[in-house]
Amino acid sequence: ETGVTQTPRHLVMGMTNKKSLKCEQHLGHNAMYWYKQSAKKPLELMFVYNFKEQTENNSVPSRFSPECPNSSHLFLHLHTLQPEDSALYLCASSQGVVDYNIYFGPGTRLTVT
Amino acid sequence: LAKTTQPISMDSYEGQEVNITCSHNNIATNDYITWYQQFPSQGPRFIIQGYKTKVTNEVASLFIPADRKSSTLSLPRVSLSDTAVYYCLVVDTGGGNKLTFGTGTQLKVEL
């Protein structure tokens, strides 16, 4: 148990749908992250939040919209996605943004049809 | 960011020691070497971190030579459950978290 939970674990959505991924960390951490892992590709950092403030957006398309209402919760709102957005979306947290020990959640397997 | 290079895959048998070497020729003074493990359909998990010489914990050992341009993750007596992807990362602890994952090394352990 990593202390980082994600829901749903699997999601299938059409290109015109709107859905949200949810992440919650129970570790008292201050930094939270969204990563994307596509088949046969390295993990890509998407967004970084530190004390609820977004500190990094790694040139992510606007069809992905993050939200961090507090240090324990992180959302990724999805709309008008493309089939190439199908991937494993991983949430993670760490004590601070200079912490090398990052705790990952189990991920949401997203399929866009 | 210091780039890392590691083998794409390795095969081993249960009970053997596995050594995975990573090169990071452009490592900077503030950089730490960190290794993560990822099982299929799960998020990566931190294994070990070091700056120089040798670090050992209950999971693995990390060997870093004096020039720090490479590092070796050593897994003693592997079992089937050690089959996973192992990532070598160089982390700039002086400038904010920049965890950049490469493609990792796919370790396959067989009977």
Image (spheres, rainbow, N blue to C red):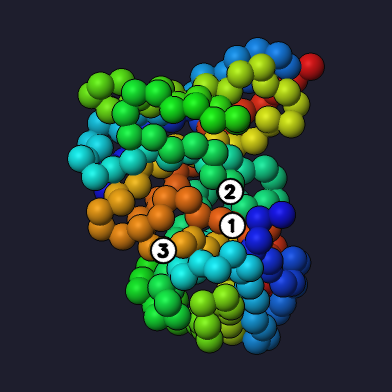
Residue at x-position 59% and y-position 57%: A104
Category of crowding for the residue at label 3, using alpha-carbon neighbours closer than 10 angstroms: few (below 14), some (14–19), many (at least 20)? some
- Residue B108 falls in image quadrant: top right
**Chain designation of label 3:** A
Residue at x-position 75% and y-position 26%: B80
Mark 1 on the same chain as mark 3: yes
Q: Is residue B49 left or right of residue B26?
A: right
Q: In this view, does B8 lie above or below A63?
A: above
Mark linked to residue B24: none
**Tag 2, which secondary structure?**
loop
**Tag 3, which secondary structure?**
loop
Callout 2–callout 1 Cβ contact below 8 Å: yes
Mark 2 on the same chain as mark 3: no
Mark 2 on the same chain as mark 1: no
Callout 1–callout 3 Cβ contact below 8 Å: no
Residue at x-position 75% and y-position 67%: A10
Closer to the observer: label 1 or label 3?
3
Residue farthest top in this picture: B16
Towards the viewer: A32 or B7: A32
Compute the Cα span from label 1 to label 3: 14 Å
Q: Mark 2 points at which residue?
A: B44
Category of crowding for the residue at label 1, using alpha-carbon neighbours closer than 10 angstroms: few (below 14), some (14–19), many (at least 20)? many
Q: How many labels does the image show?
A: 3
Indicate the amino acid at tag 3: Gly
- Residue B106 falls in image quadrant: top right
Compute the Cα span from label 2 to label 3: 18 Å
Residue farthest right in this picture: B111
Indicate the amino acid at tag 1: Phe
Q: Name the residue under label 3.
A: A96
**Tag 1, which secondary structure?**
strand
Mark linked to residue A104: 1
